[in-house]
Image: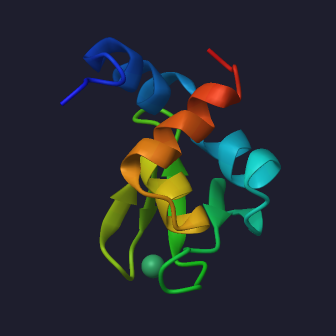
């Protein structure tokens, strides 16, 4: 099977595309700042019981108890598979 992206490239897509702007500006997922946290509508449970951590570049849903990195959030929001999500992020040319 042909390898389509290097480990380093995947690491950059996960770490270097800022999760907040990706959620709010690029994907257009409803979001808000409350109690100092950037929160977003969870694409799985559709609730705002979420937060993002700029240090880890992860979004977390406390209700679903899952973390979303940039690849995960694209997969969930757009119903893409892993490869499609990676291509979507790469095509943003943000790196
Ligand atoms: Zn959720």
**Is residue 18 visible in this depiction of the protein?**
no
Compared with 73, 43 (above or below) is: below
- Residue 81 lies, in percent from the top left, at 42, 57
Front residue of 26 and 49: 26
- Left or right, residue 72 beside residue 30: left
Rendered residue at 68%/20% (across/down)? 94
Find ligand 1 in the image and state its quadrant.
bottom left
Q: How is the image coloured?
A: rainbow
Compared with 59, 2 (above or below) is: above
Occupied quadrant, residue 14: top left
Q: Quadrant of the N terminus?
A: top left
Compared with 38, 48 (above or below) is: below
Rendered residue at 81%/47% (across/down)? 25
- Residue 2 lies, in percent from the top left, at 25, 25
Rendered residue at 59%/66% (across/down)? 77
**Is residue 76 visible in this depiction of the protein?**
yes
Count how many numbered circles sit on residues in the image.
0
Front residue of 72 and 49: 72
- Left or right, residue 4 beside residue 38: left
- Residue 27 lies, in percent from the top left, at 73, 54
Front residue of 91 and 1: 1
Q: Quadrant of the C terminus?
A: top right
- Residue 89 lies, in percent from the top left, at 59, 35
Occupied quadrant, residue 41: bottom right
């Amino acid at each position: 099977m042909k390898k389509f992206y290097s480990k380093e490239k995947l690491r950059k897509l996960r770490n270097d595309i800022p999760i907040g702007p990706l959620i709010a500006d690029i994907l257009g997922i409803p979001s808000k700042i409350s109690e100092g946290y950037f929160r977003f509508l969870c694409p799985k449970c559709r609730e705002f019981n979420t937060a993002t951590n700029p240090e880890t570049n992860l979004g977390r849903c406390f209700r679903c108890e899952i973390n979303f990195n940039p690849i995960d959030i694209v997969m969930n929001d757009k119903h893409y598979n892993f490869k499609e999500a990676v291509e979507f992020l790469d095509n943003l040319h943000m790196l």
